[in-house]
Image: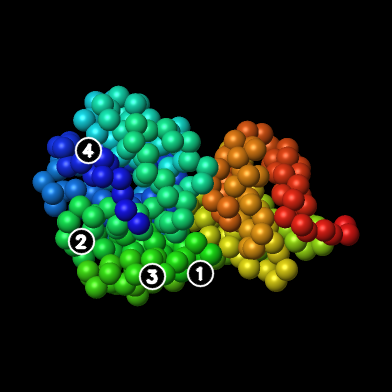
Amino acid sequence: MNAPEQLIQTIHRASDILLCTHVLPDGDAIGSLLGLKAALEAMGKNVTAALSDEVPPYLRFLPGADDIKPVDCMADSFPLAIVLDCGALDRVGRCMAAVEASRLTINIDHHATNSGFAAMNWVNVDSGSTAEMIYALITQMGVAISPEAATCLFAGISTDTGSFRYSSTTAETFRAAAALTEAGASPWRVSQSIYDTKSYDSLAGMAEAILGMKFECSGLVASMDITAELMARHKLTESETEGFISYARSVAGVEVAVAFKEVHANEIRVGLRSNRKVDVARVALALGGGGHVRASGLTFRGSLDQARPAVMAGVKKALREAGFTWTD
């Protein structure tokens, strides 16, 4: 995997760089951001890393996480803004004004639904994660990867490949992970911090969501409702519910898992996952979202009762197009 030479030369020429990623950042977003920030600073660049939302609690162990600005970005004009792991410009949230005011913009991503919004776009849909692309970019630029950067990039690769379980995992993914481990990343520390440390409230909320799962299409579809009331009762932030959907997808016989997350009275975040054949990115895209073939999402403006039939209609259509049939 090689980054475009023009992109590399643009980075070399810039002295002040803005880095940002999507709202509600996940492990790949934060890992890519921090890994690239460390590499650029090692090159002598002045780097501002900013987020529209705070770093999720489970990712605050990553080196440099405290240096990310969790507030509105200034509308200053940067010579270069690099947007990571983001399929559309509006997904950067409150950082959008600063990106638009920058003289040059670069978009580095691996989502198939990426809109190509920047002046320079490097989108590799065959990559298992954006962090894997950032590893390749840093290596191509000849910058030594510090243990801190290695840890961040390893976390990004691990989370976006489901701990190397998803179909997007390739031999190149494992080579990158091995090189990052040699550079100082600790797979055990990453796994312990991200996957094996949960609050009791988080586990209780997850158990309730799992026990409330609904099954449709002869068991081909499993869905769960993560209501605002459930999150409030278990004191959960939205980021703490991110992994709930994986349990719906893991049920034997399920092809598509859907999570309806009620973040406000008329705002439902919908997560979509598939196992083998269904392209959930097309389902999400039809409703204003996007993502990967096997993992996508969207924001539905309306109530939970309105979101469910709209999303399920798209899911059933995608199941039929993939050749599935059912009796109920």
SS of the residue under disc 3: helix
Picture disc at residue 165: 1
- In the rendered structure, which disc, 1 or 4, sits on the residue that comes first in sequence? 4
- In the rendered structure, which disc, 2 or 4, sits on the residue that comes first in sequence? 4
Q: Amino acid at mark 1?
A: Arg
* In the image, residue 33 above or below residue 13: below
Residue topped by disc 4: 10
- Along the line of sight, the residue nearer the viewer: 44 or 203: 44
Residue topped by disc 2: 145
Is residue 71 visible to the viewer in this orientation of the structure? no
- In the rendered structure, which disc, 1 or 2, sits on the residue that comes first in sequence? 2
- In the rendered structure, which disc, 1 or 3, sits on the residue that comes first in sequence? 1
Q: Are marks 1 and 2 in contact (CB under 8 Å)?
A: no
Picture disc at residue 174: 3
Residue 123 in the image, given as x and y percentages of width and height: 41, 45
Q: Amino acid at mark 2?
A: Ile
Q: Are marks 2 and 4 in contact (CB under 8 Å)?
A: no
- In the rendered structure, which disc, 2 or 3, sits on the residue that comes first in sequence? 2
Is residue 111 visible to the viewer in this orientation of the structure? yes
Give the left or right position of residue 37, taking residue 282 as reference. Answer: left
Residue 321 in the image, given as x and y percentages of width and height: 74, 51
Q: Residue at x 21, y 65 (%)?
A: 147
Where, by quadrant of the figure, is residue 327 drawn? Answer: bottom right
Q: Nearer the viewer, mark 1 or mark 4?
A: 4
Residue with the most extreme bottom position:
188
- In the rendered structure, which disc, 3 or 4, sits on the residue that comes first in sequence? 4
* In the image, residue 136 above or below residue 291: below
